[in-house]
């Protein structure tokens, strides 16, 4: 459904190789997590998919069509995008923020409001309490949920999420992850989810793509990556979580020993 081949992006006249030959395909309904540390090219990869950044090389096919041959507005309509660092409009209230993509699409005001209120319910922000709050009046985790509601507004087939739970504490993050899993079961989207958090990747991914310096080191299910790391980099990255998981399993799965 999304097929990326040898994708490249250079900045600074070719001096910075932000993305350096990424190939990846995402099946319908699948959640792929792009996992990697700061500066490895996750955001740049995601932005190229809906043409916020033009590729320097390679190709991206969405729904059987090369994105460079597609109408850019149509392309973006089929893709919901949650920006890194939330990006809510501070002078618009919560419900107006969720309405932005619907306004751009020309949905009439009444319908727009109805849909936005429905979405706030969906992300567990009761509209009676939250619809008329401004972004600086609600918590970071609540702002991130508004960002998710906004990305879902036009019912896009694809969802690209760039560290959507980055700015919240561990407990809230855990709740948001569980909510996302529940939401996904209800709405069945094809997703690419970006994070630098290994446990978040293990929790959410159908498959994890481990990125390092603009390249993908390994793609596979959590089990595949934990049991058969393809490179030294992946082995080191997952070393500690793998030991913790093993310890946990030993303590909890063999009570008779
Ligand atoms: N517009 C730009 N101009 C120049 N260099 C850029 C630009 N955007 C990104 N880069 C560089 O490309 C590389 C990859 O950046 P990118 O934002 O994709 O990383 P990231 O993996 O999303 O990092 P983070 O986890 O910190 O968000 C970095 O070295 C960054 O400095
Ligand atoms: Mg980023």
Image (cartoon, rainbow, N blue to C red):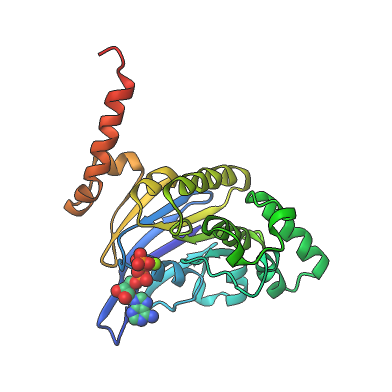
**Quadrant that contains the C terminus:** top left
- Residue visible at 26% across and 32% down? 246
Residue 199 placed where, x, y %? 36, 46
The answer to which of 137 and 145 lies nearer the viewer is: 137
Q: Quadrant of ligand 2?
A: bottom left
Residue 106, compared with residue 168, is above or below; it is below
- Residue visible at 52% across and 59% down? 140
- Residue visible at 34% across and 42% down? 222
Residue 207, compared with residue 12, is above or below; it is above
Residue 16 placed where, x, y %? 27, 79
The answer to which of 111 and 127 lies nearer the viewer is: 127
- In the image, farthest residue toward the left: 232
Left or right, residue 164 beside residue 98 = left
- In the image, farthest residue toward the right: 110
- In the image, farthest residue toward the front: 137
Left or right, residue 42 beside residue 246 = right
- Residue visible at 78% across and 59% down? 114
Q: Residue 134 lies in what quarter of the image?
A: bottom right
Q: Residue 41 lies in what quarter of the image?
A: bottom left
Residue 45 placed where, x, y %? 40, 68
The answer to which of 1 and 92 lies nearer the viewer is: 92
Residue 227 placed where, x, y %? 25, 38
């Amino acid at each position: 459904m999304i097929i990326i081949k040898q994708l490249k992006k250079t900045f600074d006249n070719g001096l910075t190789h932000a993305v350096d030959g990424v190939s990846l395909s995402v099946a319908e309904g699948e959640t792929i997590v792009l996992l990697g540390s700061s500066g490895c090219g996750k955001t740049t990869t995601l932005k190229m998919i809906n043409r916020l950044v033009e590729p320097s090389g390679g190709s991206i096919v969405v729904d059987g069509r090369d994105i460079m041959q597609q109408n850019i507005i149509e392309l973006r309509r089929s893709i919901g995008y949650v920006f890194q660092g939330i990006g809510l409009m501070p002078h618009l209230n919560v419900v107006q923020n969720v309405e932005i993509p619907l306004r751009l699409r020309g949905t009439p005001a009444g319908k727009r409001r109805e849909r936005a209120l429905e979405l706030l319910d969906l992300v567990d922000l009761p509209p009676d309490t939250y619809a008329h709050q401004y972004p600086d009046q609600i918590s970071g985790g609540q702002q991130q949920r508004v960002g998710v509601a906004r990305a879902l507004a036009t019912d896009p087939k694809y969802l690209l999420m760039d560290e959507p739970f980055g700015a919240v504490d561990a407990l809230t993050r855990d709740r948001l992850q569980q909510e996302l899993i529940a939401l996904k079961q209800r709405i069945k989207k094809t997703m690419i989810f970006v994070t630098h958090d290994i446990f978040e990747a293990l929790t959410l991914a159908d498959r994890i793509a481990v990125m390092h310096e603009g390249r993908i080191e390994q793609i596979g299910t959590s089990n595949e990556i934990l049991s058969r790391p393809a490179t030294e980099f992946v082995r080191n990255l997952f070393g500690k979580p793998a030991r913790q998981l093993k310890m946990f399993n030993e303590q909890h799965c063999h009570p008779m020993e």
